[in-house]
Image: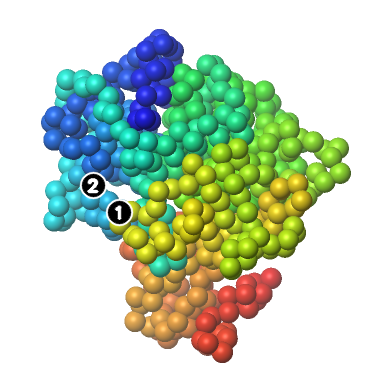
Amino acid sequence: MNIVQLLVRSARVYPERPAVLLGDAPVLNYGQLAERASRLAGYLRNGLHLEPGARVGIYMTNHVAYLEVMYAAWWAGLAVVPINAKLHAREVEFILDDAGAQVLFVTADLAEEMDVVLQGRATPCTRITPDQADYAAALQASAIAPTHRQPGDLAWLFYTSGTTGRPKGVMQTHRNLYAMTSCYFSDLDSVEADDAIVYAAPMSHGAGMYNFAFVAQAARHVVPVSGGFDPAELVDLSRTVGRLCMFAAPTMVKRLVEHMEASGAEADGFKTLVYGGGPMYVQDIQHALTRMGPRFVQIYGQGESPMTITALSRSQLADHDHPQWLSRIASVGVAQTLVEVRVVDEAGADVPHGVTGEIVVRGETVMAGYWNNPQATASALRDGWLWTGDMGAMDAQGFLTLKDRSKDVIISGGSNIYPREVEEVLLRHPGVREVSVIGQSDPEWGEVVVAFVVASGATSAQLDALCLDHIARFKRPKHYHFVDSLPKNNYGKVLKTTLRATLQ
């Protein structure tokens, strides 16, 4: 049940169909994509002598080689570890060490900083860079047959930050990925041969996980020339490529709509925009629907059940005449087909409709656990249910509305930022005595990071420099508030609700 069979099947049946495009220029058809993946797989197994189950790191910006690297790893029976290209080198080093990665694929723009990390590792890790000689040599290896894997074998190891400040490796199996792909077809959208998924968001995350549905249907995969999100470029691609589908954070949707409104561009070339990863304000989705029409689907998920907890369908979003339309478009929809979703109290009992509790989910999409972290696994997975740490309320029709995040995660531009991780870095400054990090509502990014700091002799510039030296740029605070003390309860816990109130 190796997920690579999706590519094997499409390449066998539709070898001439275009598979990978750079902008609107075809790069590979399905036959060529499979051939290259099989040769890379041969190099990984026979050249580097990797055994089935070994982990392959992918620290790449969006690139036309991304798909063939992932499928090569699965072809060889290995597990991929896609790493956010925005992460600091020290964060990448932790992930490589924790995962025990023996190979790291790195795009040229990130190779120099990675060489310093790789040279200092106790365990050797081979670095391979697309478009360079080592990659070209790997493609000369003899092709191998796809390696058989069991449904429960590890396929995708995704590192998500946690409240402890250390990333945790979420183990997604081949079965999980097949179930996630089935949910795409049943709850989000159909895929036709002439559809095209455009990777305007990082392929290391949710956008990349949607590749499976399009590979299964032998549809097109478009990597923007910019490598990321550019509204004008997407509009151009909608005209030249057509039938664009994409995953986008709400902030990206808002910026795209604003560009189309300002430029007068038509939405005809867009087929489906799936949004998620952060709060979508009612006013913003109303505006988007008015400007672009019924092209939107909302999903709610997390790394532990990626893209697959609830969905708000195209028809539900477009049903303006429904008496509960406004409350429904403020929700994240209903449970997806292959999962069960409940809202419970601390004891795990269902709360009444409309009452806020913790969201729990069970189904074939839920992770196998956290890599080498049985304590965190036992905390998150209880009696077959994933405790998400997210708070919400469900109405009598099953529509779920998110209320708060018990883990205090800050979602900025669709990226998760955990306060504890930032706090630990700021506390490295000798002048910082206490610090508390929270999210502040922001019209462009959804939320921005704000730090309340009790310090002597520390400046905003010094703290910024400290953050830039230890964590990704997007995680550093946008604002610093230097205070004499932090509000606390009788047990000494910082009252973040009080801090949030001061920002209103």
Residue occupied by mark 2: 101
Q: Earlier in the sequence, mark 1 or mark 2?
A: 1
Q: Is residue 272 visible?
A: yes
Nearer-the-camera pick, 172 or 462: 172
| Residue for point 49% across, 53% down | 384
Q: Which residue is mark 1?
A: 95
Task: Reply above or below: 342 against 481.
Answer: above
Query: Is 463 placed above or below 455 here?
Result: above
Residue 483 locus on image (x, y percent): 53, 83
The amino acid marked with disc number 2 is Ala
Is 48 displayed left or right of 484 in the figure? left
List x then y, in percent, for residue 120.
15, 56
In percent of the image, x 54 and y 16: which residue is there?
194
Helix, strand or loop status at disc 2: loop
Question: How far is mark 1 from mark 2, CA to CA?
Answer: 8 Å
Residue 263: give x, y in percent of width and height.
67, 32
Q: Is residue 14 left or right of residue 107?
A: right
Q: Nearer the viewer, residue 323 or 410?
A: 323
Query: 343 or 229: which is nearer to us?
Result: 343
Q: Residue at x 33, y 53 (%)?
A: 371
Q: Is residue 303 left or right of residue 487?
A: left
Q: Look at 60% across and 37% down and name the residue there.
A: 337
Give the secondary structure at mark 1. Answer: helix
Mark 1 and 2 residues: CB-CB less than 8 Å, in contact? yes
Q: Amino acid at mark 1?
A: Ile
Count the marks: how many?
2
Check residue 280 in the rendering and tell me which mark sits there, or answer none: none
Determine whether 246 is above or below 87 in the image.
above
User: Residue 13 in the image: x percent, y percent?
Assistant: 41, 11
Q: Quadrant of the C terminus?
A: bottom right
Q: Quadrant of the N terminus?
A: top left
